Amino acid sequence: RLVAESRIRRQLAEVQQVIAATQAKLRDMLGSIGASCDAWKYALLREQATLHSLNLLSFDIKRAVFVAEGWLPTAELEKVRTALSLAARKAGRGSSTIVNVLETSATHPTFLPTSDFTSGFQGLVNTYGTPRYGEVNPGCFAIVLFPFLFGIMFGDLGHGLLLLLLAGYLIRNEAAMKKQQLDDIMSMVFGGRYVLLLNAICAMYVGLIYNECFSVPLGLFDSVYTLQGVQGTDMEVQWNGGVYPFGVDPAWQRAGNKMTFFNSYKMKVSIVFGVAQMTLGLCCSLVNHIYYKDRRSIWFGFVPEICFFLSIFGYLVFMIFAKWATDWVGEAKRPPSLLNTLIAMFMSPGSYKEEDRIFAGQEHVQLLLLLIAFISVPLLLLPKPILAYLDMKKKAAQPLPRSELDAVAEGSPAAGPSGEAEGEEQEGDGLADVVVHQVIHTIEFVLGSISNTASYLRLWALSLAHSQLSELFWDKVMVAQAFGSKLPAPLHAAVVFFAFAVWFILNLGVLMVMENLSSFLHALRLQWVEFQNKFYHGDGVMYKPFAYAKLGAARDE
């Protein structure tokens, strides 16, 4: 019995030693495999990508060579030729690869080189659609227009400074954060760090124009207005005849008609910038027509569109500046309502209903502009379908080519009566498409000109909401609770501290997050819908070159 137990214990010890040695061996093997696993995966991805690209090549039996066709930026052509020559030399081949430039009617892909600074703005455009090859790229304009539209809605020096600190932190730690695995939200914020930077700069600039820092007027310069009278009663305002050096005079922040003034000012500014941006969009459509050599779209697209748009809304902007430039008090005149003037321009052509005119002969100018607008509509609607119908008739009257005549003589069914009928049916469908497209485009442009211009009033609405929320938080928390506290000094300091904490949290949560996101989305809508739909198709194909470097990014994802 003792001998049996001893033998069994010895065998168990040997088995445990074997198991321990096996486990250690497995740990070492798995550790070495794990250390090389990423490299193996990357090598397999490279091999798979290489073989997939080689499968796309075609073999020329006569010349016994492989033929590859692909897209390449013109600026990179010489680099590719040099790289292929070096590769052939390293492989020990006597002949180098032949590279020829081919002419093709296939759709060209769009290649948009970007940097860290421009990639965020181009990403906003690409989310809407990839630019068609050769058309104007809205990403260039988005670098300037998008942040400025955001700044109009988010204009405040203090809030812009907080946004600038966030953008500065992301840019300063750019190299380190590129190596980190960021979540989806943080990745989007980091990708748009330069968008945030320009948004912050424009918000600070417009905040200086509004003369607001957390809704508190700055008073950088002496006001041109002085108050005379007893504090707490109706005081008389005296103007010294000067002009405030920059932005809005801080005296307007204490005026009784403050809301009336800022509403009128911001509403008119919104219309001015909206009409200017949409006019730029129409001019970009002219550049597209010139590039594609589409003369019909120039004369029967751009010309009637720009005439219709400027004869109404361009005239409205002119009246805004003319009204601002007129000293109505000094001339003892009553300023006219621009909205009523514009409505009467359509409802009562040739007559002027307001008490005083902005300029002499205004009703005659309005009648002429109204006539131009009405003539522009049929010029936009009719010529293209008529020219398409004439092209169809001209093509039908031309004699058939010799090859098609021979086919008809031989009784080919493809070129017989049924084939001719099929061709006529296709031409008829093409004419119908032109008619339907032009009718829809005309209605969309005429109605869209009105709705798009009204849509820019969101600049006024968001700017007003931002200013009023900021003023509400300051007045109700800091002024009423912190500065208005009558408690003794130690308790008063505690009240100021807690009131400041509440005010700061409200500014971060409501204005810096919710209002910031709202202004961003509204500026993006104006960029996409009101601006880009004037010229941008967005139906292009993005150029995706073959590169081993992208395999590493795909592996990380």
Image: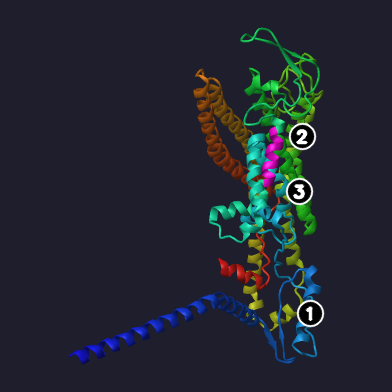
Q: Earlier in the sequence, mark 2 or mark 3?
A: 3
Q: Position of residue 156 (x, y in %)?
A: 65, 34
Name the residue beneath numbered marker 2.
Answer: 369
Name the residue beneath numbered marker 3.
Answer: 302
Residue 437 in view (yes/no) = no
Q: Find numbered disc 1 in the image and state the secondary structure of the residue it sits on.
A: loop
Q: Position of residue 459 (x, y in %)?
A: 64, 36
Query: As shown in the figure, which amino acid type bears the numbered disc 2?
Result: Leu
* In the image, residue 305 lies in the stretch drawn in magenta: no
* In the image, residue 198 lies in the stretch drawn in magenta: yes
What whole-number distance in Å separates the C-alpha atoms at marks 2 and 3?
17 Å
Answer with the quarter of the image where residue 546 lies. Answer: bottom right
Q: Which circle, 2 or 1, is nearer the viewer?
A: 1
Q: Find numbered disc 2 in the image and state the secondary structure of the residue it sits on.
A: helix
Name the residue beneath numbered marker 1.
Answer: 99
What whole-number distance in Å separates the C-alpha atoms at marks 2 and 1?
58 Å
Query: As shown in the figure, which amino acid type bears the numbered disc 1?
Result: Val
Q: Position of residue 301 (x, y in %)?
A: 74, 49
Q: Earlier in the sequence, mark 2 or mark 1?
A: 1
Packing grade of label 1 (10 A; few <14, some 14-19, many >=20) is: some
> Dots 2 and 3: beta carbons under 8 Å?
no
The one of 169 and 543 positioned closer to us in this rendering:
169
Give the extent of the magenta segment.
Answer: 197-207
**Residue at position x 64%, y 74% from top?**
419
Q: Please indicate whether residue 475 sits to the left or right of residue 376 in the image.
A: left
